[in-house]
Image (cartoon, rainbow, N blue to C red):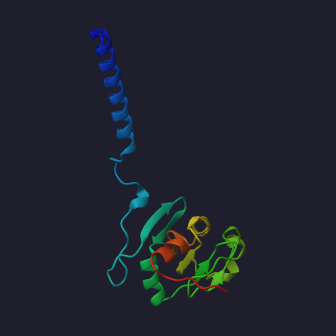
């Protein structure tokens, strides 16, 4: 290999490594946490439960399967499956309302928009949409199972069929 070709190859490799370094730097998140990454609020027992998620019009709280299981052990809220089509329920489910019809079924929800409500679906996608709808309608105490029934089962909990 000639000296000119070696120098050209070195320049090419240097340029390539610079591009890769810049690309990888763009993949890391060194900025401050987003407003949706606020720490969980303490409960009346002082234990933090859930992760608040801020959206336009308000916020809701994402909970893990373990946190939801603890909430269900002391259940004081309507627990709603919004998944369509039906693929099973988590025990203690009170209602099944299609996620895209939640706003047309407000008569089935507490009249008090500050009352606690918890939603879930199979993967979390449909229940996120329904949760956001409720927040936009003025509900202030909405809880959401992050990851849905899939996360519930992965945590070792079972589902009920009809």
Which quadrant is home to the C terminus?
Answer: bottom right
- Tell me where residue 91 appears, x and y as whole percent: 56, 87
Q: Is residue 91 above or below residue 4?
A: below
- Residue 74 visible within the image: no
- Residue 66 visible within the image: yes
Q: How many numbered marks have been drawn onto this rendered protein structure? A: 0
Kindly indicate the quadrant of the structure image that contains residue 149.
bottom right
> Which residue is located at x 50 percent, y 77 percent?
153
> Which residue is located at x 42 percent, y 79 percent?
66
Kindly indicate the quadrant of the structure image that contains residue 51.
bottom left
Q: Is residue 131 above or below residue 76?
A: above
Q: Is residue 95 above or below residue 1?
A: below
- Tell me where residue 55 appears, x and y as whole percent: 52, 60
Given residues 105 and 83, the one toward you in this image is 83
- Tell me where residue 107 appears, x and y as whole percent: 69, 81
Kindly indicate the quadrant of the structure image that contains residue 6.
top left
- The residue lying furthest to the front in this view is 1
Which quadrant is home to the N terminus?
Answer: top left
- The residue lying furthest to the bottom in this view is 74
Given residues 91 and 15, the one toward you in this image is 15
- Tell me where residue 27 appears, x and y as whole percent: 39, 43
Given residues 47 and 84, the one toward you in this image is 84
Residue 75 left/right relative to 88: left
- The residue lying furthest to the left in this view is 3
């Amino acid at each position: 290999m000639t000296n000119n070709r070696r120098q050209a190859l070195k320049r090419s490799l240097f340029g390539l490594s610079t591009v890769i370094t810049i690309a990888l730097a763009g993949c890391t998140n060194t900025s401050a946490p987003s407003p949706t990454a606020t720490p969980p609020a303490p409960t009346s027992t002082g234990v933090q439960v859930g992760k608040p998620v801020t959206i336009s019009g308000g916020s809701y709280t994402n909970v893990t399967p373990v946190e939801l299981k603890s909430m269900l052990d002391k259940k004081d809220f309507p627990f709603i499956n919004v998944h369509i089509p039906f693929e099973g329920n988590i025990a203690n489910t009170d209602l099944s309302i299609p996620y895209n019809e939640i706003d047309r079924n407000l008569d089935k929800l507490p009249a008090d928009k500050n009352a606690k409500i918890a939603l879930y679906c199979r993967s979390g996608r449909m229940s996120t949409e329904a949760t956001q709808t409720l927040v936009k309608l003025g509900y202030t105490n909405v809880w959401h199972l992050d990851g849905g029934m899939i996360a519930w089962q992965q945590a070792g909990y079972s589902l009920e069929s009809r």
